[in-house]
Image (cartoon, rainbow, N blue to C red):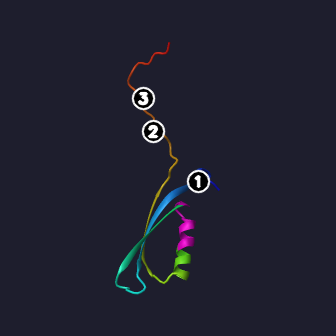
Amino acid sequence: MRDIERQLQGYRLTTTEILYHMPDHPGLLQSFILQKFDQAPSFPVLRKFLTFWEREIDGRIHSVRVAAKGLISPVEMRFANGDFRLH
């Protein structure tokens, strides 16, 4: 499916920051950024990724922050001040 089709179906550009404990140094946190198209508020793509992370990656997750923005939104309309003449 193309990106524009996903957006029309309600997908939004979602940026996720995952802080996780480094496997070799659990006292240190590392940051991982993930950017995908996903559906708010359930975020099925992110949930699938986090399930994969918990199952396959050694770094234990500390916290997850999510920001989502719809790229297709109503256009703001404003009237121009002026007089336009066509010949």
Q: Which residues are magenta?
A: 37-49
Q: Report the disc number at residue 28.
A: none
Disc marking residue 3: 1
The amino acid beneath tag 2 is: Glu
- Nearest the viewer among 47 and 34 is 34
At label 1, the amino acid type is Asp
Look at discs 2 and 1 and give the one toward the viewer: 1
Q: Residue furthest left?
A: 27
Mark 3, other Cα within 10 Å: few <14 / some 14–19 / many ≥20: few
Residue 86 image offset from top left, x and y in percent: 49, 15
Gap between marks 3 and 2 measured at Cα: 10 Å
At label 3, the amino acid type is Phe
- Residue 81 as seen in the image, left or right of residue 45: left
Q: Which residue is mark 2?
A: 76
Q: Residue at x 49, y 60 (%)?
A: 14
Residue at point 57% right, 54% down?
10
User: Is mark 3 in CB contact (under 8 Å) with mark 2?
Assistant: no
With 25 as the anchor, is 74 left or right in this view? right
Tell me the crowding category of disc 2: few under 14, some 14 to 19, or many 20 or more residues within 10 angstroms, Cα based: few
Residue at image location 39% in from the left, 21% down from the top: 82
Q: Residues within 10 Å of mark 1 (few under 14, many from 20)?
A: few
- Residue 20's place in the image compared with 25, above or below, is above
Q: What whole-number distance in Å separates the C-alpha atoms at marks 1 and 3?
A: 32 Å
Nearer-the-camera pick, 86 or 11:
86
Q: Which residue is mark 3?
A: 79
Label 1: which secondary element: helix
